[in-house]
Image (tube, grey):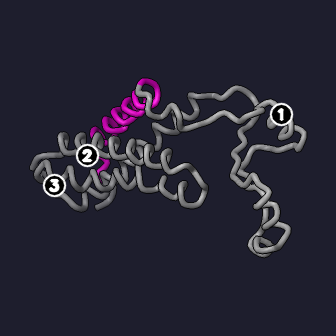
């Protein structure tokens, strides 16, 4: 089936991305349920000064750092017991450029649309029932927006409340995507 599905399904791909983008903006800027997802460090200025003094550069860090070879050493175990233990993401210095993140999020929404369009084009014929298209696209979009984030709770120690709230958001995005595709699905 080549890339014909893109020519036929470009409108639901684009419109679902726009609608998910709008919904996510409302969820994060208007609704209060994500307001407690991030906390401020106590003595933030001292922590920031210590990180600057250590010369950290942009990247993902874990501490106490260890390799698979030394993760069971007494030294590493002592550091883990002493604490803190965690992951740290460092961005480049300077003001956060929010448009970059918004553009990347929108591109991600388009990629999800393209992938679920490909899936739906193989699972539903033109003229398929609304509920059939809704189910196929909804499951694919749910997997893309919700399930992948669960690994952050498993491997990176994200609080499960945050992980589950993001998964809930993903359900909303999946339903929006499914409804858009089912509504605009090509007739015979």
Q: Considering only vertical position in the picture, is 56 above or below 31?
A: below
Mark with earlier residue (2, 3): 3
Q: What residue does disc 1 label?
A: 46
Between residue 88 and residue 91, name the one nearer to us. Answer: 88
Q: Quadrant of residue 94?
A: top right
Residue 6 is inside the magenta segment = yes
Distance of label 1 from label 3 (alpha carbons): 56 Å
Q: Residue at position x 22%, y 42% from top?
A: 179
Q: Position of residue 10 (x, y in %)?
A: 30, 42
Residue labelled with disc 2: 178
Read off the magenta span: 4-30
Q: Position of residue 74 (x, y in %)?
A: 83, 72
The quadrant holding residue 119 is bottom left
| Residue position for label 3 | 132
Which comes sooner in the sequence, label 2 or label 1?
1
The nearer-to-camera label among 1 and 3 is 1
151 to 110, vertically: above or below: below
Which mark is nearer the camera, 2 or 1?
A: 1
Taking the magenta stretch, the answer to whether it contains residue 21 is yes
Quarter of the image with the N terminus in it: bottom left
* Res 145 visible: no
Identify the element where label 3 is drawn: helix
Q: Position of residue 79 (x, y in %)?
A: 81, 60
């Amino acid at each position: 089936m080549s890339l014909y599905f893109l020519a036929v399904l470009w409108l639901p791909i684009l419109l679902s991305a726009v609608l998910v983008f709008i919904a996510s903006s409302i969820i994060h800027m208007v609704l209060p349920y994500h307001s407690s997802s991030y906390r401020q460090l106590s003595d933030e200025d001292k922590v920031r000064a210590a990180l600057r003094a250590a010369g950290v550069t942009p990247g993902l860090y874990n501490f106490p750092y260890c390799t698979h070879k030394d993760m069971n050493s007494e030294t590493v175990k002592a550091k883990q017991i002493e604490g803190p233990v965690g992951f740290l993401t460092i961005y480049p210095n300077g003001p956060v450029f929010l448009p970059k993140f918004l553009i990347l999020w929108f591109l991600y929404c388009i990629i999800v649309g393209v992938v679920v369009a490909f899936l739906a084009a193989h699972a539903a014929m033109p003229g398929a029932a609304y509920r059939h298209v809704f189910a196929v696209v909804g499951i694919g979009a749910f997997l893309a927006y919700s399930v992948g984030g669960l690994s952050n709770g498993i491997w990176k120690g994200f609080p499960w409340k945050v992980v589950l709230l993001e998964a809930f958001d993903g359900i909303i995005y999946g339903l929006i995507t499914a409804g858009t595709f089912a509504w605009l699905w090509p007739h015979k």
